[in-house]
Image (cartoon, rainbow, N blue to C red):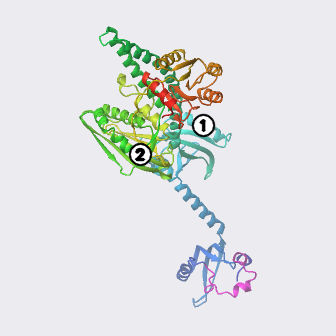
């Protein structure tokens, strides 16, 4: 016998259809159905109570039941039949399976998930991610409240935050806070809190996200923005200062030429000249940091460039410090100014020398490196691609984290009054100007390592040499000088006249255009400042070229403006004179521009 409820549960239309089946032989039960347990228990004890089993419906789907049965025997004790009941528990079993699945997901989540009593604040649950982050067991955590792991929040403040949730005025609360681990260390967390119920009790469910990486990226962004702002300021100051230095240097040079070796004033002027040159070096460093330093990039074999510097680096480091070079034999080519390589290594060498007390070692390594997705995961500020890596390591006293975070800032120095704070700022600017990036690693007492990544050059230009050029001779051509700084205009005009040139002087781009329109003879060269009011040097050159197609152009500036160059690198074929210039550099560059050299 089977009642209609059992027939519906199993999917039979009539009892006769069920009665025709042999449930023992026709796979009416799922393979894991405990049929043997049922038979052994009921035959031994005569009864089965609450056995949970899996049956199979007529359509092949699984039915979960909770069955209870007893054996009915005849007068002699022989088994006649079983009678019992079966309760459909399919919904409950599936719900429990889903609950276990969800619990597994919660446990495997790297985010922190907490549950705590809304009134007492005692923890009732925490997932594995939360316990791992805090370094606590669940038993240890249950003895605490959220306030115990939040060193920046008091119980009163936390209660005030929770009250809108407790009263139902808010459905959730987002809170950025700090959690403290068992060992006392802390980490930043973004929490989302919601009210819920658990066993009839009001609880707060909290989901926490460790935002250490996000904060690190935000700090890097703020640092980059600060460096960019300081760089713009430094570049502007250096540009204006270079004009003044140019006047000091040139007039000092001219005065020295008129004085004999025994003149009393000569020593004084030489000191002025030395101070001006030192100041020019400082402005050059500021321009390098600002990425507005004039550079002439060439395709280089860094190993060869560095090899030329080994003697100089050894002298900078001194006799007590051992310098070694470990170069990769098949190093990729790069395209950059060889002088900038010198600047980078000289600044790093001076820093290493000052950091090493007594004897020590400095190692410079070169290697090829491809930045891929796995590298980007741990260095998010880098760019994918092929790089030549220069690794510069010393065995000096090292730096703490606070100092390490500031080393590339201009004017920050660990040397007190002995340092300008521009050495590493210069290195940083040069690397950025060449589309590379730089990392520094250091620990107190364990030395410092700088890793400098310069993009691989894949063009067809051949690696060039670094041969210098002879001073240019004088000339007789006509040069139109456009410069809004009156002292520089007068100075350039005087020097060019002394070298045989005819000079037309213009205080502004408008004056230069008028002179070009009314001058009867040829104008062979325009010598123009890059940055001037109303019209920049590039625009002036274009207008003059339209008037006089034969005219050539030489730009001059304390830095290279974007109208002349892209990212501070001169376009091919553009002539440029870096301020502050000397008498010889002005004469040579003008001659080169007229002759089409460089």
Measured as percent of width and height from the top left, residue 144 is found at: 48, 44
Q: Is residue 265 magenta?
A: no
Q: Is residue 410 above or below residue 97?
A: above
Measured as percent of width and height from the top left, residue 224 is found at: 51, 35
Rate crowding at label 1 as few (under 14), some (14 to 19) or many (20 or more) other CA atoms within 10 Å: some
- In this rendering, position of residue 309 left or right of residue 245: left
Work out whether residue 298 or residue 9 is closer to the camera in this orientation and state it: 298
Q: Is residue 28 magenta?
A: yes
What residue is disc 1 on? Answer: 161
Which of the 4 image quadrants contains residue 391?
top left
- In this rendering, position of residue 414 left or right of residue 44: left
Find the magenta span and give its range. Answer: 7-29
Q: Residue furthest top?
A: 264
Rate crowding at label 2 as few (under 14), some (14 to 19) or many (20 or more) other CA atoms within 10 Å: many
> Most prominent secondary structure in the magenta stretch?
loop
- Helix, strand or loop at disc 1? helix
The disc label shown at residue 109, or none: none
- In this rendering, position of residue 407 left or right of residue 10: left
Between disc 2 and disc 1, whose residue precedes?
1
Q: CA distance from mark 2 to mark 1?
A: 51 Å
Identify which residue is drawn at 37% across, 19% down. Answer: 274
- Helix, strand or loop at disc 2? strand
Asked if marks 2 and 1 touch (Cβ < 8 Å), the reply is: no
> Is the N terminus in the top left, top right, bottom left or bottom right quadrant?
bottom right
Q: Residue furthest bottom?
A: 76
Q: Is residue 407 visible?
A: no
What residue is disc 2 on? Answer: 389
Work out whether residue 188 or residue 217 is closer to the camera in this orientation and state it: 217
Measured as percent of width and height from the top left, residue 252 is found at: 41, 15
């Amino acid at each position: 016998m089977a009642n209609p409820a059992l027939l519906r549960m199993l999917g039979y239309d009539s009892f006769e259809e069920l009665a025709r089946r042999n449930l023992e032989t026709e796979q009416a039960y799922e393979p894991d159905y405990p049929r043997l347990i049922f038979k052994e228990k009921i035959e031994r004890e005569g009864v089965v109570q609450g056995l949970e089993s899996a049956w199979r419906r007529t359509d092949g789907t699984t039915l979960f039941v909770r069955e209870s049965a007893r054996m009915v025997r005849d007068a002699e004790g022989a088994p006649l039949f079983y009678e019992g009941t079966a309760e459909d528990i399919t919904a409950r079993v599936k719900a429990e399976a889903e609950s276990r699945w969800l619990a597994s997901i919660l446990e495997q989540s790297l985010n922190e998930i907490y549950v705590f009593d809304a009134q007492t604040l005692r923890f009732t649950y925490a997932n594995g991610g939360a316990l791992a982050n805090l370094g606590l067991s669940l038993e240890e955590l249950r003895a605490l409240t959220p306030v115990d792991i939040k060193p920046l929040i008091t119980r009163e403040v936390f209660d005030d935050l929770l009250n809108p949730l407790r009263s139902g005025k808010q459905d959730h609360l987002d809170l950025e806070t700090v959690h403290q681990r068992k060992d006392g260390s802390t980490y930043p967390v973004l929490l989302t809190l919601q009210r819920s119920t658990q066993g009839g009790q009001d609880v707060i469910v909290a989901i926490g996200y460790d935002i250490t990486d996000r904060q690190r990226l935000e700090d890097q962004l703020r640092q980059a923005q600060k460096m960019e702002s300081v760089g713009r300021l430094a570049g502007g100051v250096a540009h204006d200062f270079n004009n003044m230095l140019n006047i000091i240097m040139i007039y000092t040079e001219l005065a020295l030429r008129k004085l004999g070796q025994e003149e009393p004033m000569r020593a004084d002027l030489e000191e002025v000249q030395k101070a001006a040159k030192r100041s020019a070096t400082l402005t050059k460093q500021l321009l390098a940091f600002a990425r507005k330093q004039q550079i002439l990039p060439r395709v280089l074999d860094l190993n060869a460039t560095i090899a030329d510097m080994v003697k100089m680096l050894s002298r900078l480091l001194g006799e007590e410090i051992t310098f070694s070079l470990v170069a990769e034999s098949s190093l990729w080519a790069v395209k950059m100014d060889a002088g900038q390589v010198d600047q980078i290594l000289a600044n790093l060498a001076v820093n290493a020398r000052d950091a090493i007390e007594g004897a020590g070692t400095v190692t410079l390594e070169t290697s090829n490196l491809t930045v891929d997705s796995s590298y980007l995961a741990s260095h998010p500020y880098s760019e994918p691609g092929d790089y030549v890596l220069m690794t510069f390591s010393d065995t000096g006293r090292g730096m703490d984290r606070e100092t390490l975070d500031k080393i590339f800032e201009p004017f920050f120095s660990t040397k007190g009054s002995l340092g300008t704070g521009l050495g590493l700022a210069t290195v940083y600017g040069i690397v950025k100007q060449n589309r590379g990036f730089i990392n520094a690693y250091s620990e107190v007492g364990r030395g410092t390592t700088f890793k400098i990544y310069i993009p691989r050059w894949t063009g067809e230009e051949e690696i060039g040499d670094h041969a210098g050029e002879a001073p240019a001779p004088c000339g007789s051509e006509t040069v139109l000088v456009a410069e809004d700084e009156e002292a520089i205009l007068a100075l350039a005009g005087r020097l060019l006249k002394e070298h045989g040139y005819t000079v037309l002087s213009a205080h502004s781009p408008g004056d230069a255009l008028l002179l070009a329109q009314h001058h009867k003879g040829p104008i062979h060269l325009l010598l123009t400042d890059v940055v001037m009011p109303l019209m920049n040097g590039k625009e002036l050159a274009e207008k003059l070229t339209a008037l006089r197609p034969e005219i050539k152009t030489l730009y001059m500036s304390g830095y290279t403006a974007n109208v002349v160059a892209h990212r501070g690198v001169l376009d091919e074929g553009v002539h440029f004179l870096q301020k502050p210039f000397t008498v010889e550099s002005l004469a040579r560059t003008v001659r080169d521009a007229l002759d089409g050299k460089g």
